[in-house]
Image (spheres, rainbow, N blue to C red):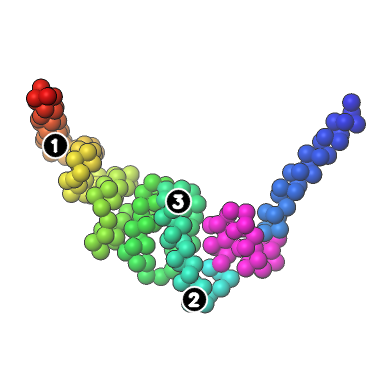
Amino acid sequence: DSAARAALASAITAAVARERLPLAEAQARERRGDLAGAAARYAALGSLPDAFRLRYTADSSATARAALRRELVAFITAHTGMADARAAAGVLDSYRAPTPAEDLAVGRSLAQSGPAAAAVTRLRRALKAGLGKAEDRFAYASALFAMNRYADAAYQYNLVRKPAALAASAAYGRARALVRAGQVSEARSALRLIIHRDSRRVHHDQQSLSDH
């Protein structure tokens, strides 16, 4: 009946309000300037990027900033490619002079989530410092490709020589980049080389099977 429906609606409204209360409290504390309190509330809600943002502003001491910096890098590494990691990277950008290790962690994440331009900047610095693996070089090339920097992407793809599966993907990526860069003759040569390598691999696999 109408009374039962009204009671149910009231109960649902109250439940929704209770669920929203912790977030409302965090937001209210932030508006009042209680940044440390708001950060704690956001952290309890699992909204760590918001907590990181407020902690950076709330405590500018060297000790607090250093601790937060380590937490940010660890969080980005653990959540690489996710939206929360991208938000945390925005807080990390507030620090001056990023280390090569920080550039690598952030670059890896942004290569997946974007923006590509930020990924390129971070990965370029990390790779120049001697950090990173072949997968990072491939991600750097792919980010360059996403920025329409096709000639640069082709060059970076060409530096990926192992492992074999990744090198094969890089060879194809290089050919695509050369086409986009208008270097059609070079792209054809690259594609012929890919076909030649693939045919040799197939022949080798067939020979291996026949030997058994």
Question: Dot 3: within a 10 Å radius of its alpha carbon, few (fewer than 14), some, or many (20 or more) residues?
Answer: some
Say which residue label 3 marks: 79
The quarter holding residue 70 reads bottom left
Q: What residue type is labelled 1?
A: Ala
- The disc, 2 or 1, on the residue closer to the chain's N-terminal end is 2
- Residue displayed at 44% across by 56% down: 76
The region drawn magenta spans 28-55
Residue 188 shows in the view: no
Q: Disc 2 versus disc 1: distance between alpha carbons?
A: 53 Å
- The residue sitting at 26% across, 60% down in the picture is 131
Camera-side residue of 205 and 62: 205
**Magenta stretch: residue 36 in it?**
yes
Q: Could you tell me residue 144's position as x and y percent?
A: 29, 48
Going by the numbered disc 3, the residue's amino acid type is His
Residue 63 disc label: 2
Horizontal side, residue 55 vs residue 186: left or right: right
